[in-house]
């Protein structure tokens, strides 16, 4: 955290309702915003200048850090989600605590370059090969928390319960690394984890196919009693729905509801293949939904019902999931674009609503309700998008938010500030000085062990 007060001068800033010019943002030694003052025409002496449009920091609400090693490597040939999963398991089998740290540090640094200030890591590679426990049961989790700290971003570690290969199917192969044996044993191990100033803890149910019905309430109670966010993969593939109906006579959403999983602290990830009753259950319980449009396209999962979910009462957030690309601006934009494809009509979400999904709502889903806004007492986490690139140049200043949300990419991010600290300055990461090199080294080392 910063040791002194710092003042930033934003050329333009989105303050939740409007884009303002010449905005002074003062931060405290505790890493919070103490004042936001628009209408300052030029930067005062000592202020750090942020040219472009400054936005609240972006929250990547769903990440599997080791999937970054699969980028481009799975784009040859055809297949389905299930064939892609085979390649993913091969990568998971090769992970060690050291290689996981190196890869996650590089992936999280790439996130900082994309304006992401907080990541939700859906973590299930808990143990060694064959399911052999490490001497320190938190070793892999600690590697991820250390990686986020080294990359300068916040993390919510969503420690994941994973017990079965499918409904009534035992685990085998790489999956043995994921399991604690029972939901109670998972809870016991998860209780040994600790957070920190930039790390918080959450819980996750991998899916209804990976956690038997009698374990769902155990995980939900664990999260509820400790006040932690709870995430769950939900109805990503039609096969999950079909298998669940055969096993329980219920959709996955109904099964989660039966066991007390749904609620305002819970986030359903993907929620792609839902019935009308499923949508109503999620909305009525105020369960959030995390959409991952790039991954859902890349894996041919389908297009989720974003508009009906929002109308039913579910807050929406976004994630980069498998990291085919890391670009939260593109993920937010795709929520609207997918809804256009699904319905044949335009104009379902405003630019402000999409940005809130990528910032305010994402932080709330990850247990950081004090982040995601540019206002006094909020965490001093923000990012600046260039308005003079080939993608964003041209629109008038009053359309800066639309230019950022509908035209910019992660390549247009110029600055990222976390807790008042300048983590990315003029497009350069201040802690990981050569992020592409770090990614190449980490991925090459991991591939060499396969």
Image (cartoon, helix red, strand yellow):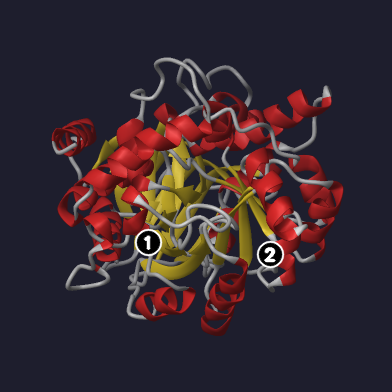
Q: Looking at the image, which residue sits at the far bottom?
A: 225
Which of the marked residues, 1 or 2, is nearer the chain's N terminus? Answer: 2
Residue 256: numbered disc? 2
Mark 2: give few (<14), some (14-19) or many (20+) Cα within 10 Å: many
Q: Is residue 227 visible to the viewer in this orientation of the structure?
A: yes
Q: What residue sits right under mark 1 in the picture? A: 419
Closer to the camera, 221 or 318? 221
Q: Quadrant of residue 346?
A: top right
**Mark 1 secondary-structure assignment:** loop
On the image, the x and y values in percent for residue 259 come to 69, 72
In the rendered view of the protein, which quadrant contains the C terminus? top left
Rendering coords of residue 83 (x, y %):
46, 30
Where is residue 77 shown, x and y percent of the image?
Answer: 43, 15
Query: Mark 1 Cα within 10 Å, few/some/many (few <14, many 20+)?
Result: many
Q: CA distance from mark 1 to mark 2?
A: 36 Å
Q: Nearer the viewer, residue 10 or 113?
A: 113
């Amino acid at each position: 955290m910063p040791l002194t007060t710092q003042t930033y001068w934003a050329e333009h800033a989105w303050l939740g309702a409007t884009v303002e010019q010449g905005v002074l943002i003062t931060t405290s030694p505790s890493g919070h915003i103490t004042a936001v003052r628009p209408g300052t025409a030029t930067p005062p002496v000592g202020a750090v200048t942020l040219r472009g449009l400054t936005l609240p920091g972006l929250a990547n609400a769903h990440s599997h850090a080791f999937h970054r090693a699969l980028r481009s490597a799975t784009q040859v040939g055809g297949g389905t989600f299930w064939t892609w999963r085979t390649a993913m398991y091969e990568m998971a089998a090769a992970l060690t605590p050291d290689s996981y740290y190196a890869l996650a540090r590089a992936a999280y640094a790439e996130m900082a370059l994309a304006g992401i200030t907080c990541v939700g890591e859906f973590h299930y590679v808990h143990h060694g090969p064959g399911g052999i426990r490490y001497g320190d049961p938190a070793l892999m989790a600690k590697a991820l928390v250390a990686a986020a700290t080294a990359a300068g971003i916040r993390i919510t570690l969503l420690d994941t319960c994973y017990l079965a290969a499918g409904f009534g199917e035992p685990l085998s192969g790489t999956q043995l690394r994921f399991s604690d044996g029972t939901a109670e044993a998972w809870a016991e191990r998860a209780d040994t984890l600790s957070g920190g100033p930039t790390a918080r803890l959450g819980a996750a149910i991998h899916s209804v196919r990976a956690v038997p019905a009698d374990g769902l309430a155990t995980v939900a109670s664990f999260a509820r009693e400790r006040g932690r966010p709870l995430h769950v993969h939900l109805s990503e593939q039609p096969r999950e729905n079909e298998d669940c109906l055969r096993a329980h006579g219920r959709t996955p959403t109904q099964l989660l509801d039966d066991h007390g999983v749904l609620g305002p602290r819970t986030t359903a990830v993907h929620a792609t293949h839902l019935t009308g009753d499923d949508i109503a259950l999620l909305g009525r319980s105020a369960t959030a939904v995390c959409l991952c449009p790039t991954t859902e396209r890349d894996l041919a999962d389908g297009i989720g019902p974003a508009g009906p979910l929002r109308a039913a009462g579910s807050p929406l957030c976004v994630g980069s999931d498998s990291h085919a690309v890391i670009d939260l601006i593109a993920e937010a934009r795709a929520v609207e674009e997918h809804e256009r494809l699904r319905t044949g009509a335009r104009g379902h979400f405003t630019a402000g609503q999409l940005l809130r999904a990528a910032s305010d709502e994402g932080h709330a889903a990850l247990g950081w309700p004090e982040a995601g806004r540019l206002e006094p007492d909020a965490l001093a986490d923000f990012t600046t998008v260039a308005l003079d690139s080939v993608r964003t140049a041209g629109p008038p200043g009053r359309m800066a938010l639309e230019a950022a949300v509908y035209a910019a990419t992660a390549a247009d991010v110029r600055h990222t500030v976390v807790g008042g600290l300048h983590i990315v300055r003029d497009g350069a990461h201040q802690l990981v000085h050569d992020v592409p090199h770090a990614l190449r080294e980490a991925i090459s080392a991991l591939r060499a062990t396969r």
